[in-house]
Amino acid sequence: MGLKVAITDDPDAPKVFLREEDFTRYPWDYGELTERLRKRHVNFKVVESYHSIRKSLMADSRYCMSRFLDPGNHGRRL
């Protein structure tokens, strides 16, 4: 269970600052996903069918989100 939080204009209320790095809803990158699948499935291979399934799931926000390499600099693309 998490902490209860409320938005307030009370100047005496404790201040909390959250950054994108504080949230890890999608903690796995491509390498982590691929490694976990290799460990879980004996016959797992990184082939076109894997990429096709992975890419279709990436389009669904329930499973994936795009992140900036530098969250503080949204204008710069690397």
Image (spheres, helix red, strand yellow):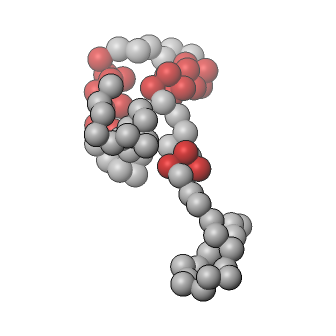
Q: In the picture, residue 70 is in which quadrant?
A: top left
Q: Position of residue 67 (x, y in %)?
A: 39, 40
User: Is residue 37 visible in the rendered structure shown here?
Assistant: no
Quarter holding the N terminus?
Answer: bottom right
User: Would you say 63 lies left or right of 35 here?
Assistant: left
User: Is residue 14 visible in the rendered structure shown here?
Assistant: yes
Q: Position of residue 50 (x, y in %)?
A: 36, 23
Which residue: 52% across, 34% down? 28
Q: Is residue 37 above or below residue 7?
A: above
Q: Position of residue 31 (x, y in %)?
A: 50, 22
Q: In the picture, residue 10 is in which quadrant?
A: bottom right
Which residue: 44% across, 14% down? 45
Which residue: 35% across, 14% down? 47
Q: In the picture, residue 74 is in which quadrant?
A: top left
User: Foreground: 52 or 58?
Assistant: 58
Which residue: 63% across, 65% down? 16
Number of dots carrying numbers: 0
User: Foreground: 1 or 21?
Assistant: 21
Quarter holding the C terminus?
Answer: top left
Q: Is residue 7 above or below residue 74?
A: below
Q: Position of residue 33 (x, y in %)?
A: 50, 28
Q: Residue furthest front?
A: 11
Q: Is residue 26 above or below residue 62?
A: above
User: Would you say 77 lies left or right of 44 here?
Assistant: left
User: Foreground: 18 or 26?
Assistant: 18
Q: Residue furthest bottom?
A: 10
User: Foreground: 77 or 60?
Assistant: 77
